[in-house]
């Protein structure tokens, strides 16, 4: 019912020469899972031309406004014009490095929708919040405030990324992932109704590797992954894509 999604997040890594790491992914691309590489904005034009639609290309942030005096920022329209069809919003690194709030992230998602960019909205608890037993409260509040009312299944992907699992090699238990993903699905169902919630894809992110991907993809309500470090090298990302294909 939901097309699975393998999303790579290159963060501030990669140059044009790293097309070498994308070509092998293009070569194994099939209809399901969909693959999206969220790459530095300066690479979007070239990589979207070279991938010829076999994979999708995404940005990693956009401004909430459509245009204007915002030196150094990029609009959703500029990403879309360069060849992107997705944009990652509210990644925990942007929340931490740039003070992004849930309300700002919702505004950015609306900006993305205005130009038909799909938003991958990231949420996730800190280690202290997990230890304090407040994970579901934190996730619920982030969902309520960072996912706009306009969100639909074909415009919005939710990525659950526990902050303490990003780039650390630490991964929640499969039960913990299932608990949060089931919670997200039911929260979306309460708010948007079943028809919308059942088409919205939910990704897990945080230290996904070839060795743990198949187990994670077998968890209820996990429709794919947002992969950071292991998306940089095709020898790591290809087996993750293939594990999702067989899930
Ligand atoms: P990681 O990053 O896979 O390197 O843990 C995931 C992310 O930040 O999206």
Image: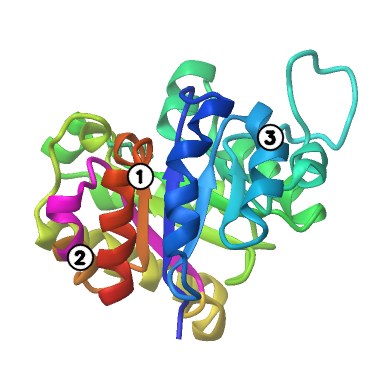
Q: Is residue 45 left or right of residue 203?
A: right
Residue indicated by mark 3: 62
Q: Characterize the local packing of mark 1: few (<14), some (14-19) or many (20 or more) Cα atoms within 10 angstroms.
A: some
Which secondary structure lies at badge 3? loop
Q: Say above or below: 240 vs 185.
A: above
Residue that badge 2 annotates: 178
Circle nearer the viewer, 3 or 2: 3
Image point (62%, 70%), residue name: 154
Query: Label 1: which residue?
Result: 234
Q: Is residue 145 visible?
A: no
Mark found first going from the N terminus, 1 or 2: 2
Q: Position of residue 53 (x, y in %)?
A: 65, 61
Looking at the picture, tell me which residue is in the foreground, 131 or 4: 4
Whether 104 is drawn above or below 1: the answer is above
In the picture, measured across the screen, residue 191 lies left or right of residue 57, that is left
Q: Residue at x 32, y 48 (%)?
A: 237
Q: Is residue 208 magenta?
A: yes
Q: Which residues are magenta?
A: 200-214
- CA distance separating discs 3 and 2: 30 Å
């Amino acid at each position: 019912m939901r097309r699975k999604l393998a999303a790579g997040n290159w963060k501030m890594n990669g140059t044009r020469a790293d097309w070498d790491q994308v070509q092998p992914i293009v070569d194994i691309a099939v209809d399901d899972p969909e693959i999206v590489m969220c790459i530095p904005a300066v690479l979007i034009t070239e990589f979207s031309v070279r991938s010829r639609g076999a994979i999708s290309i995404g940005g990693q942030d956009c401004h909430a406004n459509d245009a204007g005096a915002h030196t150094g920022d990029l609009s959703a329209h500029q990403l879309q014009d360069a060849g992107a069809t997705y944009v990652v919003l509210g990644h925990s690194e942007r929340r931490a490095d740039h003070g992004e709030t849930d309300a700002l992230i919702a505004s950015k998602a609306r900006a993305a929708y205005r130009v038909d960019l799909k938003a991958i909205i990231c949420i996730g608890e800190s280690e202290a919040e997990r230890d304090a037993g407040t994970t579901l409260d934190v996730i619920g509040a982030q969902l309520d405030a960072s996912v706009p009312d306009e969100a639909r299944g074909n415009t919005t992907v939710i990525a659950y990324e526990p902050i303490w699992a990003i780039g650390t090699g630490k991964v929640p238990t499969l039960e913990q992932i299932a608990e949060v993903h089931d919670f997200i699905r039911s929260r979306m169902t309460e708010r948007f109704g079943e028809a919308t919630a059942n088409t919205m894809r939910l990704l897990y992110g945080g230290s996904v590797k070839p060795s743990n991907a198949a187990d994670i993809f077998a968890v209820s309500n996990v429709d794919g992954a947002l992969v950071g470090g292991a998306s940089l090298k095709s020898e790591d990302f290809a087996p993750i894509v293939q594990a999702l294909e067989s899930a």
